[in-house]
Amino acid sequence: MGNVTDVVFFLYSLETTRGGDSTTQDDNSGFMRGLEIERMCVEGRELDNIVSHLIDRLRGGENARRTTRLLALCSLTHGGIPAAKLETVR
């Protein structure tokens, strides 16, 4: 494991395979969307785009715990999230 993306992928692989072979296509696509958000955070993309993706995850019924972790990553990589943007996620 050489970089952050490898570590993140490894950790998510552990989480998604923890349930055995019961992973569905929806689980995998949710995983890929989460990985995309992580990549956006690490690359320093615009906060508005990341928050928009997080809102879409919540509205789409994605796992709230994973989405909260992504929100925490976003906050860490962007030096916090302004209250106005955070209100839209709530």
Image: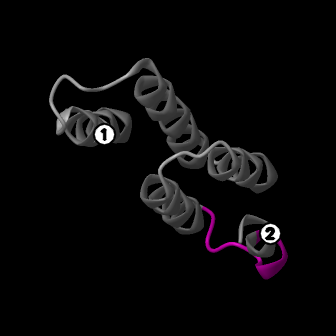
Identify the residue at image location x=30%, y=26%.
23
Identify the residue at image location x=49%, y=60%.
73
Q: Quadrant of the C terminus?
A: bottom right
Q: Is residue 81 magenta?
A: yes
Q: Is residue 8 left or right of residue 47?
A: left
- Residue 65 vertical position relative to residue 9 in the rendered view, above or below: below
Three-letter code for the amino acid on which mark 1 is drawn:
Tyr
| Magenta stretch, residue numbers | 78-85
Identify the residue at image location x=28%, y=36%.
16
Q: Is residue 16 magenta?
A: no
Q: Quadrant of the N terminus?
A: top left
Secondary-structure class at tag 2: helix
Q: Nearer the viewer, residue 34 or 44?
A: 34
Identify the residue at image location x=72%, y=53%.
55
Residue 86, percent from left and from top: 73, 72
Q: Is residue 1 left or right of residue 87?
A: left
| Label of residue 85 in the image | 2
The earlier-in-sequence mark between 1 and 2 is 1
- Residue 28 vertical position relative to residue 66 in the rendered view, above or below: above
Label 2 Cα neighbours within 10 Å, binned few <14 / some 14-19 / many ≥20? few
| Label of residue 29 in the image | none
Residue to which mark 1 is pinned: 12
Report, in whole angstroms, how far the alpha carbon at label 1 lies from the one at label 2.
26 Å
Three-letter code for the amino acid on which mark 2 is drawn:
Lys
